Amino acid sequence: MLGGALGSARESLLAEYSARLAESTLRHGVRLAEPSARIDNQLAGNIKSEFMAKFLANMSQELRSPLDTVIGIADLLVEHQRRPLQDGDIVTHGARIRDAATHLLCVINDVLDISRMRNDAFTLDTREVELGEMLQVALASLRPTAFEAGVALEGHFDKDLPRIEGDAGKLRKVFSNLIGNALRFTPRGGAVRVTGRRLNDGGVAVHVRDTGNGMTQEEIAAALAPFARSSHARWREGTGLGLPIAQALVQLHGGALQIASSKVHGTEIKVILPSKATRRECEAT
């Protein structure tokens, strides 16, 4: 009886000691983690503050320029009775107002897209997409821009280019953005070539190659960072969100966006989109 009582008491003491040791270890771990957590929170706050500072600085410039144009032309129209405008001037001013408004709309859309991206709120209206037709439409819409810039715009696509599952509107935004920027940064007399080919696994690879000045690895990294500004970055114009948004949209489709560039050979952006079967397998897992 005495031995049993002693054993029971020993087990009780060991259990109590183990519980207190665990509690002490937990408290010690919490004390060690608190400074690290404060540092992490501070770093996160600094990154957020830096992002917002860049955001506000860029938005101020991107909104002010077109608004100045609209306000200036509005002043001219208000003074029309005292200082009549010629018909040609009115047409020119109307075109400038349209361009300024279009730019403002693009800025607003970019801001909304980057906000959704940061909040993981991008959603896809998924359906079967004829990627070849979409690319042809994108090329046709940009041919006047290419002609005005003096840049040859070519498109070559496999005849058996497969359909993919995706959001037609968002994919159109991706490729119009990539082709438009390739045209913008290719000098007169250069060329932009868009190709689409079927991959062995049923997916699609789209290449947008230009003969522009190209980028260094540092400039590529800057181009992929929201709001990055560089005196040499090809994506420096506008909000600085075009390529990050394109990359986010491609990744949302289960694909990948890759950039190869050099100062001698220009830039090639490759977009890989998975087949319907591969995409469904990834979603299932």
Image (cartoon, rainbow, N blue to C red):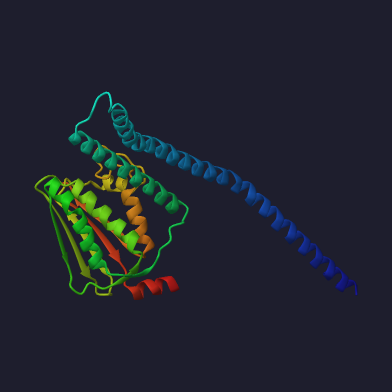
Q: Name the residue at 21% across, 38% down.
A: 91
| Percent of width and height locating residue 213 | 16, 45
Left or right, 186 with reference to 129: left
Q: Name the residue at 34% across, 42% down.
A: 104
Left or right, 117 with reference to 215: right
Work out whether residue 40 or residue 164 is closer to the camera in this orientation and state it.
164
Q: Residue furthest right?
A: 1
Quadrant of image for the N terminus: bottom right
| Percent of width and height locating residue 259 | 25, 55
Q: Name the residue at 28% across, 42% down.
A: 98
Q: Quadrant of residue 75?
A: top left
| Percent of width and height locating residue 219 | 27, 45
Left or right, 132 with reference to 15: left
Quadrant of image for the C terminus: bottom left
| Percent of width and height locating residue 160 | 20, 75
Q: Residue furthest front?
A: 81
Vertical position of residue 66 compared to residue 34: above or below? above
Q: Is residue 279 visible?
A: yes
Q: Quadrant of residue 140?
A: bottom left
Work out whether residue 281 or residue 7 is closer to the camera in this orientation and state it.
281
Vertical position of residue 64 compared to residue 150: above or below? above
